Amino acid sequence: MHKSIRELNPDAILKVNIQGEEYYFTLEYERSQKVIRRYETLIKNYYQNPNVQAVLFICENEQIKKQVMKAEKRIVSQNEFKFFYTTLEELNSLIFINQNQEVLNM
């Protein structure tokens, strides 16, 4: 496990093996809405860390999800998003979708 990933202080770190390749995903859970600057800082830190391939972001509700997605769009200039979002309600299906509408099924 990379120390730089632990320094991000995620809620969980997942080591995923996909077709023989190991990847590190982090899990973030946001229960209450924060100011957009807080999300921008969090997002910048994840994008600056090359050891995190994806961030699974669970939001308490759709409003938080939209705010975090807006912050990510303000930070990321390319279409290679590494944040995948879901809400607690959607979590039963374990489907995460990024802003390019790419789906990660678990």
Image (spheres, rainbow, N blue to C red):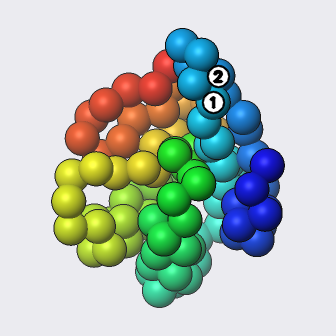
**Disc 2 residue type?**
Asn
Image quadrant of residue 15?
A: top right
* Residue 20 at least partly seen: yes
Q: Which residue is drawn at 71% across and 66% down?
A: 4
Q: Which of 87 and 7 is in front in this view?
A: 7
Q: Residue reaching furthest top?
A: 19
Q: Dot 2 lies on which element?
A: strand
Write down the residue under mark 1. Answer: 22
**Disc 1 residue type?**
Glu
Relative to 48, say whether 35 is above or below.
Answer: below
Q: Earlier in the sequence, mark 1 or mark 2?
A: 2
- With 83 as the anchor, is 71 left or right in this view? left
Q: Residue at x 67, y 48 (%)?
A: 27
Q: Nearer the viewer, residue 65 or 82?
A: 82
Q: Where is residue 48 in the image (x, y as percent from the top left)?
A: 48, 71
Q: Position of residue 57 (x, y in %)?
A: 57, 49
Q: Residue at x 47, y 86 (%)?
A: 37
